[in-house]
Amino acid sequence: MELRALNEALKILKRPCHITLYSDSQYVCQAINVWLANWQKKNFSKVKNVDLWKEFLKVSKGHLIVAVWIKGHNGHAENERCDSLAKLEAQKRTKTTT
């Protein structure tokens, strides 16, 4: 879910940016900072969410992105706000599909 949200946010940007991404997802942070280049070399062999990572590569082109991991549910105001918004959106979607 974090990766999908990141991709949607990157689509909004109109010009190349320097971005510091704060996330409680170690998977997303490690992938952006460490694993992604190697995944590309290996043609994403055995990588989960390949479609989302390929989309990330497309929408992140031209941007300089550094991902910083923060512990979730640990009092980071922005992270708590994101969690609340994600829960609200999930509840809306659940109501419209039932």
Image (cartoon, rainbow, N blue to C red):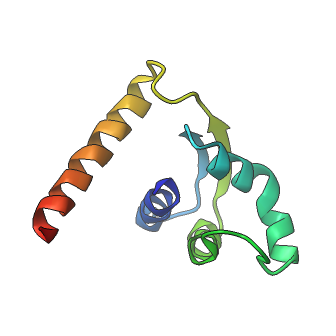
Total marks drawn? 0
Instruction: Tell me if 95 is positioned left or right of 54 in this view.
Output: left
- From the viewer's perspective, is residue 75 above or below residue 56? above
Q: Position of residue 51 (x, y in %)?
A: 58, 78
- From the viewer's perspective, is residue 69 above or below residue 1? above
What residue do we see at 49% from left, 57% from top? 6
Q: Position of residue 57 (x, y in %)?
A: 65, 71
What residue do we see at 52% from left, 59% from top? 3
Point out the residue furthest to the bottom here. Answer: 43
Instruction: Tell me if 35 is positioned left or right of 82 in this view.
Output: right
Observer-nearest of 7 and 94: 94
What residue do we see at 42% from left, 64% from top? 8
Observer-nearest of 87 and 40: 87
Observer-nearest of 25 and 20: 25
Quarter of the image that includes the C terminus: bottom left
- From the viewer's perspective, is residue 65 above or below residue 20? below
What residue do we see at 45% from left, 26% from top? 73
- From the viewer's perspective, is residue 36 above or below residue 52? above
Q: Position of residue 37 (x, y in %)?
A: 82, 65
